[in-house]
Image (cartoon, rainbow, N blue to C red):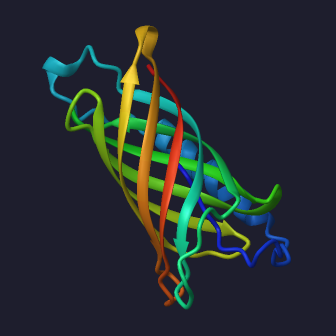
Amino acid sequence: MFTRQDSCSGCLPPRPDRPGLARVPVAAIAALVLWTGDARAEDAASVPLNYVVVGVGTTPVHRPSSGPVDGWQHDVSPSVGFGRFVSATVALELDIGPTFVRGDYAGASLVPGVVWAFSSSVYAAARVVVPVDPEVNLGLYPGVGVAHTFEYGIGIFAEGNVFSYVGRGSPDLGVAFSAGALYSF
C-alpha cells in the first residue's frame, strides 16, 4: 500500500507529458471492481468479499544499488486501493498512489498484489510496485502486516515491506512501513 520513488536529494526529474498513463490506473481499478468471479466456498459466504483501503507509507531505510545505506528518505506515499477475496484467505488487491519527497511530487505507482490472511489479524502480502510516472519500472515488494477489524467492516492495518526495484537492472534494497484504514463490504 506504499510506493517509493528514487530521488537525488530533492532534485526531481522533469515530468514528461503522458496523458495516456492516467488511463492505465483507472482502467485497472475498474477491471478489478467489475470482476465478479466468486471462488469462495459456500461456508464462507457471510464474510465480505470486497474491501477498500486508504493508507500512507514511508521509507525508513534505503540502500541504492551503488551506495551506502541511507536513513529516512523524507518520502510520504498516500494510497487508495481495492481488494477482493478470491478464496476464504486469499485476496487480490490493487493500490495506486503518488509519492512526495520533501513535499514535492516525485512519482506515481500502481501496486498489484496478493494478500494471504493466514490468521484473523496477521497477513502476508506479495506485491509488485509498478512506477508509472515519471518512468516505468518494476519493484518487488513482499511484506507482512497486522490488521484489526471493528464493527461494521471498518478496520486498521500496519504493514512492513522489504523492497527492491529490479526493472532497470540496478537493484536497490530498502524497508518500507505503511499504515491505514480499510472498509470491508
Lateral position of residue 145 relative to residue 76, left or right: left
Residue in the picture at 38% in, 24% down: 148
In the rendered view, tell whether residue 116 sits above or below residue 102: above
In terms of image quadrants, where is residue 19?
A: bottom right
In the rendered picture of this protein, how many numbered marks are placed on residues? 0
Residue in the picture at 55% in, 81% down: 64
Image coordinates of residue 52 in percent, x first then y, are 51, 31
Q: Quadrant of the C terminus?
A: top left
Image coordinates of residue 139 in percent, x first then y, are 48, 70
Image coordinates of residue 104 in percent, x first then y, are 83, 60
Nearest the eye: 145 or 62: 62
Lateral position of residue 13 relative to residue 48, left or right: right
Image coordinates of residue 126 in percent, x first then y, are 34, 56
Nearest the eye: 43 or 173: 173
In the rendered view, tell whether residue 39 sits above or below residue 126: above
In terms of image quadrants, where is residue 85?
A: top left
In the rendered view, tell whether residue 185 sits above or below residue 95: above
Residue in the picture at 39% in, 36% down: 84
Residue in the picture at 68% in, 52% down: 76
Lateral position of residue 70 relative to residue 141, left or right: right
In the rendered view, tell whether residue 38 sits above or below residue 44: below
